[in-house]
């Protein structure tokens, strides 16, 4: 099934949405992408998953945050509060036709932003979270991301001096990493994010899938132990970390597991 592109007004500029399926479908899913190049590398797998969900009767929307993808703005203008506003605007667009449920589906940073959205804005317009390989600590994500800069410098023969590019960025320097200009404001805002026990966890169903993993990581097990209530389901799915590997176009086991988890939760029949 083909998708339709839509532009809607966001807080800072027009946002691009790729919509799959029948907009009047009973159940809707909003995808929140990962960070920087992970967004581009994961597009094919995400689109295939979206098409699979539409074949079961879901309406699926993929969001490009302000400053990313086909949305307006430059990457160095992006801010976390603005991205949360983008989620707000897209949910409002989806909710124009009343539905029985809306699921926020996040990959990596997208999963962390989904949790932050609920922390900041509440869970009134969301019925469920579907999280693929969530980033738990924004600080850890940024630390790993800035290692790409050090590796790039070493490959160019300029990496003998150990420069803490992460710290230099936080101190105000605009640092380009893998082609992305990283502003100190965005980096500090992402670094401040983390998934912690919160009020919405007691009432909102969460499907957490540790993609490209053989077992549940220890840090996730510890978070599970602290999770309020009993609405968290954790699944493990081995496979390729497609958000890091170029030319990966499918993740069949993950797609099938995701479809099974969602349709069982929503009481939807699938082949």
Image (cartoon, rainbow, N blue to C red):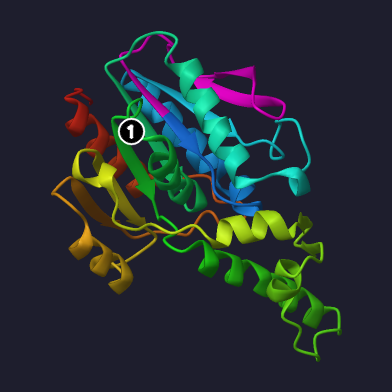
Is 22 magenta? The answer is yes
Q: Position of residue 113 (x, y in %)?
A: 48, 46
Front-lying residue, 51 or 202: 202
Q: Position of residue 38 (x, y in %)?
A: 59, 53
User: Which element type, helix, strand or loop, lies under badge 1?
Assistant: loop
Q: Is residue 42 above or below residue 1?
A: below
Instruction: Say which residue appears at 43% left-offset and 41% top-offset.
Output: 120
- Residue at which label 1 appears: 123
Is 160 positioned to the left or the right of 210 in the image?
right
Q: Is residue 59 visible?
A: yes
Instruction: Say which residue appears at 62% left-offset and 19% top-offset.
Output: 5
Q: Is residue 190 above or below residue 265?
A: below
Is 86 positioned to the left or the right of 209 in the image?
right
Q: Is residue 245 visible?
A: no
Q: Can you tell which quarter of the image residue 98 is in? A: top left
Q: Position of residue 54 (x, y in %)?
A: 39, 22
Is 106 magenta? The answer is no
Q: Can you tell which quarter of the image residue 114 is in? A: top left
Instruction: Say which residue appears at 80% left-offset and 62% top-offset.
Output: 176
- Which contiguous range is marked in magenta? 1-29
Instruction: Say which residue appears at 52% left-offset and 69% top-offset.
Output: 140
């Amino acid at each position: 099934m083909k998708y339709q592109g839509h532009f809607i007004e966001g807080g800072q500029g027009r946002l691009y949405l790729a919509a799959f399926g029948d907009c009047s479908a009973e159940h809707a899913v909003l995808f929140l992408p990962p960070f920087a190049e992970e967004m581009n590398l994961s597009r094919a797998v995400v689109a295939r998953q979206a098409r699979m969900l539409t074949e079961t009767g879901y309406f699926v929307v993929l969001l490009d945050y302000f400053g990313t993808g086909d949305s307006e703005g430059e990457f160095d203008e992006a801010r976390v509060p603005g991205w949360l506003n983008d989620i707000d605007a897209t949910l409002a667009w989806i909710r124009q036709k009343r539905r029985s449920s809306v699921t926020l589906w996040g990959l990596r940073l997208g999963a962390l932003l989904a949790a932050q959205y609920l922390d900041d804005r509440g869970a009134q317009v969301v019925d469920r979270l579907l999280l693929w390989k969530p980033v738990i600590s924004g600080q850890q994500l940024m630390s790993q991301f800035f290692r790409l800069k050090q590796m790039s410098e070493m490959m160019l023969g300029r990496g003998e001096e150990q420069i803490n590019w992460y710290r230099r960025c936080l101190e105000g320097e605009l640092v380009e990493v893998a082609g992305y200009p990283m502003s100190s404001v965005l980096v500090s805002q992402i670094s401040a994010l983390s998934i912690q026990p919160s009020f919405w966890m007691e009432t909102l169903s969460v499907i957490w899938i540790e993609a490209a993993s053989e077992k549940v990581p220890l840090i996730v097990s510890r978070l599970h132990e602290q999770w309020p209530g009993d609405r968290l389901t954790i699944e493990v799915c081995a496979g390729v970390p497609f958000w890091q590997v170029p030319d990966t176009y499918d993740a069949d086991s993950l797609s099938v597991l995701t479809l099974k988890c969602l349709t069982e939760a929503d009481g939807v029949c699938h082949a």
